[in-house]
Amino acid sequence: MEKDKALEELFLAQTPRLNDKAEFMERLTKRLDAVEYIRQYQQATLRRYKMAMVVAFAVGIISGAATVGYLLTTPAVPLFTFQVQNGFLLWLAQNSRIIASTVLSLLMTVGIFSIYNNIQDIRCFRQVCR
């Protein structure tokens, strides 16, 4: 809608003189070529964004499956130890695998949300540009 109004305003702003018809057509052709170039550039950008989203989604699925598989197949030993017998560090050492998997899950969730946000931005961008 807004694009059509902008083009309409562009055409209405042109007030050609009757004696320079060839010059007017040359300038109009250059402007229309510029508009076409911009449209093709936007379409190429959207294709790149879509491909990036598909790749990021596939990498997320693969890395998530690999992480879950790794956590399920490794023995249930702490990831690190502090050589202490009591206190917060002992609790941290005993629950290190759970903490690491929780942090990893949170990071993957943030990644999925950012991908979703980017997809919504692209959809909004496509609707505005029409």
Image (cartoon, rainbow, N blue to C red):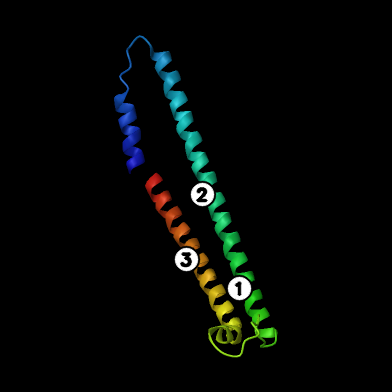
Residue 77 quadrant: bottom right
Q: What residue is disc 1 on?
A: 64
Residue 7 quadrant: top left
In percent of the image, x 29 and y 27: which residue is there?
12
Q: Nearer the viewer, residue 71 or 61?
A: 71
Classify mark 3: helix, strand or loop: helix
Q: CA distance from mark 3 to mark 2?
A: 19 Å
Q: Earlier in the sequence, mark 1 or mark 3?
A: 1
Q: Nearer the viewer, residue 86 or 1?
A: 86
Q: Looking at this view, name the residue that lies furthest to the bottom.
A: 85
Q: Which quadrant would the N terminus be assigned to in this image?
A: top left
In percent of the image, x 48 and y 62: which residue is there?
114
Query: Identity of the amino acid at label 1?
Result: Gly
Where residue 126 sits in the image (x, y, percent)?
A: 43, 50
Q: How many marks?
A: 3
Q: Earlier in the sequence, mark 2 or mark 1?
A: 2
In percent of the image, x 51 and y 49: which residue is there?
46
Residues marked 2 and 1 touching at CB (< 8 Å): no
Query: Identity of the amino acid at label 3?
Result: Phe
Check residue 113 in the rendering and tell me which mark sits there, or answer none.
Answer: 3
Name above or below for residue 124 compared with residue 18: below
Query: Identity of the amino acid at label 2?
Result: Leu
Classify mark 1: helix, strand or loop: helix
Classify mark 2: helix, strand or loop: helix
Q: Please indicate whether residue 60 sits to the left or right of residue 73 in the image.
A: left
Q: Which mark lies nearer to you, 2 or 1?
A: 1
Check residue 46 in the rendering and tell me which mark sits there, or answer none.
Answer: 2
**Dot 3 crowding, Cα within 10 Å, few <14, some 14–19, many 20+:** few
In percent of the image, x 61 and y 65: which residue is there?
58
